[in-house]
Image (spheres, helix red, strand yellow):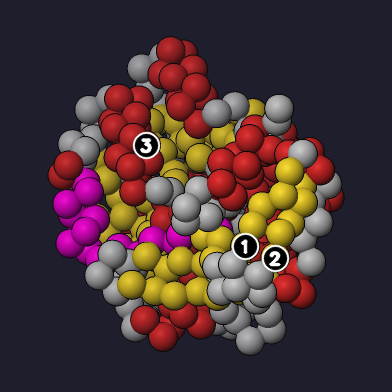
Amino acid sequence: MSDFLREVIEGLEANDKYLLSKYFYNSEGDRLFQQIMQLDEYYLSRAEAEILKEQSPQICAHLPKQGFRLAELGAGDGTKTRYLLEAALDAKKEFSYHPIDISSNALEIISTNLNHWLPELEFEPMADEYFSALSRLAQMDDKALCVLFLGSNIGNFRRDNVDVFMSHLHQSLKPRDHLLLGIDLKKDPNKILAAYNDSMGITAAFNFNILRRINDELGGQFDLSKFRHYNNYDPHSGESRSYLLSLETQDIYIEKAGRSFHFDRHEAIHTETSRKYSPRDLQQLAEKHGFKIEQRFSDSQNFYEDQLWIR
Ligand code: AVI
């Protein structure tokens, strides 16, 4: 049984139904996410691009002059990281860049871009799990490491997984190594609600993509018109949550599961959490996991921060 099938069955059998947001991302999901990043309502990407575009020289000033490695977890296409890499090259830093991603397809895209944009950059893509790649880097030599984890990706982790991730990261780094963490901040709830329910319906389409995948890959019989996208935001926990709501009572057959799943009218499938943090939440998270916040970099509207942490 594939992981996808097993996790879909587990999620749809649960009392509070859920599907894991990692399954949004096939080629259609990637395409929709690219569109989301261009939306007026989705301020996150613009805010982080502004920080990196305008403050990369200041970020780089905190990094060693020579002999360090910049390792990026889940690198994307490199558009935003490019600013940081350019600033490091301009500052004549001696470093190598290691985009890490499980998808070699993603790494091919970033490699093509980097060869084109920054032919002088020394880089080595690593098609691997994050922590396995970091431990390979640590075994190579004792060069200082700066890990980039941008895009507010940490917001999509389940709460317990944040702690597991942070303690793994702490173990993977040496004293004085850095982490540059991109995080969306708690803010006016209406701003957040709009970011996850845009007027063009792209976020809704992105959410529905998970049902489309179940239909295409697992022989599911979801009729998408019998569900609707719903999102909410809890300003205390900072959790923006997306759901698919069943518009009627229905039983849906999934061929590869060999069975049907029952949905009551208004029953919800939780599909994604995008957690927002306050500066105090981040201070507590850093302390809990043995990091110190060296510097905070925010955009002009204070929507978003890239925080430089030191181990
Ligand atoms: C990838 N991740 C940080 C996005 C977010 O904001 O949680 C995914 C996303 N979901 C809906 N819109 C964007």
Point out residue 149 in the picture as x, y percentages from the top left corner.
44, 46
Q: Circle 2 is placed at which residue position? A: 250
Res. 263 mark: 1
Residue 168 to residue 152: above or below: above
Q: Nearer the viewer, residue 231 or 93?
A: 231
On whether ligand 1 comes within 8 Å of the CB at mark 3, the answer is no
Point out residue 35 in the picture as x, y percentages from the top left corner.
70, 70
Point out residue 160 in the picture as x, y percentages from the top left corner.
33, 42
The Cα–Cα distance between marks 3 and 1, rounded to whole angstroms, is 34 Å
Q: Quadrant of the N terminus?
A: top right
Per the rendered image, the range of residues in magenta is 271-286
Among the two numbered marks 2 and 1 on one chain, the one whose residue lies closer to the N terminus: 2
Q: Quadrant of the C terminus?
A: top left
Judged by depth in the image, the label closer to the viewer, 3 or 1, is 1
Residue type, numbered disc 2: Gln
Judged by depth in the image, the label closer to the viewer, 2 or 3, is 2
